[in-house]
Amino acid sequence: MKPYFSHRSCYVNLAEHLQNSWNANVLFPGAPNRWSGGDWKNYSRMLKAFGFNILEFWLPPTMFSREALAGEKVQTDFIREINKAIGEAHKAGLMVKVLMIVNTIGQKWFFACPRVPEEKQLILKLWDFWSKALETPDIFCIFPGDPGGCARHGCTHEDFIRLALEISGVIKRNSPSSRVSVGTWGAPFSGWGSDYFPISDDADNWEKMEKEFIASGYEVPIWNGRMDRAKKAASYLVSQLDDFPEDTMIEINLGFSSDATYVHGGPAKKWAREIARKRDIVTWDYSLSEGELITYPHWRLPRMSQKIREWRSAAPYKGGMSYTMTPKLNLLSQYAAAKLMSDPDLDPDRISADFCASVFGEEHRELGELFEAFEVVDTGWGYYPRHRWSREALREAYGLIIEHLEAADVSGCSLPLFPSPEEYRQDLLWFARIFLELAADSPDRESIRKRYWEKSMKIYDHIPMSEDKRAERSAELFSQILAGLPY
Ligand SMILES: [Zn+2]
């Protein structure tokens, strides 16, 4: 059967602030978690077997930098590593999409302003550089921000769209066969505009911008809740569509908030339909399958199914993406997303059970239902669990998961998993055991924090902490899982 959606992307977020033991480290030579060509080959083969047709990644600001233009070692090394990944994905029959934030430059997340001539030149130079250095993405996505955007010197969402138009020309000149995709993530569009929050002209990076926001009682300098802003931004985009190359895609979600709900900027469906009259549309529904911050085995299948069915009914979407920061851990989520994008009518519980039967054996089919007990972590993004649990119910579920996983023989696994089925089984066992501890009446949370750091975040003993100090928060939050559970 022909897959329902033609655009079925798996987005691996390789960012410097989302490194962990299950992510690919293409940014830090000499540090752990490097992936060999064979690893990329096996990963791509798995994605293809699950039903994806696109591997998507972010080119993080450390790479989108002056150091890249100067040919420094870390950036040159990255080009070799990522081109190896692109090559293996292509050999496996996947397309590749690379996403770059239009103006976020360097490890300190400098937000270049297109109204400052030398800063604009730097933006264009970097797009020119990367659209030649990468061999060769099928899709280049021009992403508005997060982190990024500009609210200095009077910039607005219109500056983003005009900049995106100019950059489409650069991409098409350097890589004529690649398609351009334009993101509408955020406010909209993420961080572009001084109209919703007055930022000083000095606030040209994450640290300074965040300080100004926090001082004013805001939390994250991106999300603007107003519908009039969304209307202005979306209608301006519609008015400019004819100027973009004909095969340009526009990424627009069902809603403008970070979880594609209607709480910031209202519904986006009518804009999606409007845009679809002129250009292909896809969703970029980030938290569909995972959140950020804490790494654990997610289980968001019912929501995933509901959302993907809504893509189908809302507008003529060509498809969308499923995000992961743990490509070697959240195999079930990746499997389910690809299956549902191929056939939105599939039953998410059935998918879960079938996956577990294929990996762990028919007698462990019940794991498909039990894994729902991992989706109890209310941090990060997109947490809309189907059930609420008591500690007692969780303890029983984790106990059963441990029994099944200990008994399972994965030598008959019928899916081409990466990592190996045995490594996957061991990782799931580690989580089931530590979640059982977390569900106890008074767990040793400090010991859990340390063990989680060792298991998941250890790479940060070897690489610089990211600008937002995310890894430390991740370990702290992991140790507090279920702490506030009232039942
Ligand atoms: Zn500006």
Image: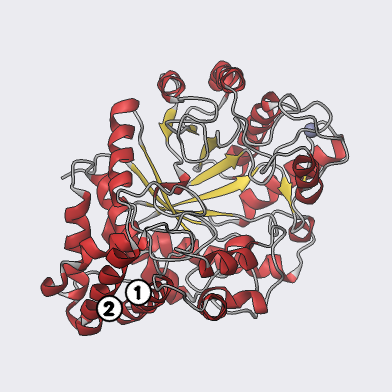
Q: What's the residue at 52%, 56% (across, down)?
A: 292
Q: Quadrant of the N terminus?
A: top left
Q: What's the residue at 38%, 60% (across, down)?
A: 298
Measure how far apart labels 1 and 2 are at the Cα level: 6 Å
For ligand 1, give the image quadrant.
top right
Image mark for residue 432: 1
Q: How is the image coloured?
A: secondary structure
Using residue 70 as the reference point, say whether residue 364 is left or right of it. Answer: left
Q: Quadrant of the C terminus?
A: bottom left
Q: Secondary structure at mark 2?
A: helix
Alpha-carbon neighbours of circle 2 within 10 Å: few (<14), some, or many (≥20)?
many
Residue type at mark 1: give it: Ala
Whether label 1 touches label 2, CB < 8 Å: yes
Using residue 165 as the reference point, say whether residue 373 is left or right of it. Answer: left
Q: What's the residue at 47%, 71% (across, down)?
A: 22
- 138 versus 329 height, above or below: above
Using residue 397 as the reference point, say whether residue 274 is left or right of it. Answer: right
Residue 392 at least partly seen: yes
Using residue 383 as the reference point, say whether residue 21 is left or right of it. Answer: right
Where, by quadrant of the figure, is residue 454 drawn? bottom right
- x, y percentage for residue 453? 56, 76
- x, y percentage for residue 4? 24, 39
Q: Secondary structure at mark 1?
A: helix
The residue pinned by badge 2 equals 402
- x, y percentage for residue 468? 69, 57
**Closer to the camera, 98 or 80?**
98
Of the image marks 1 and 2, the number of the one nearer the N terminus:
2
- 40 versus 149 height, above or below: below
Image mark for residue 165: none
Residue that lies at the very extreme toward the left in this rendered image: 363
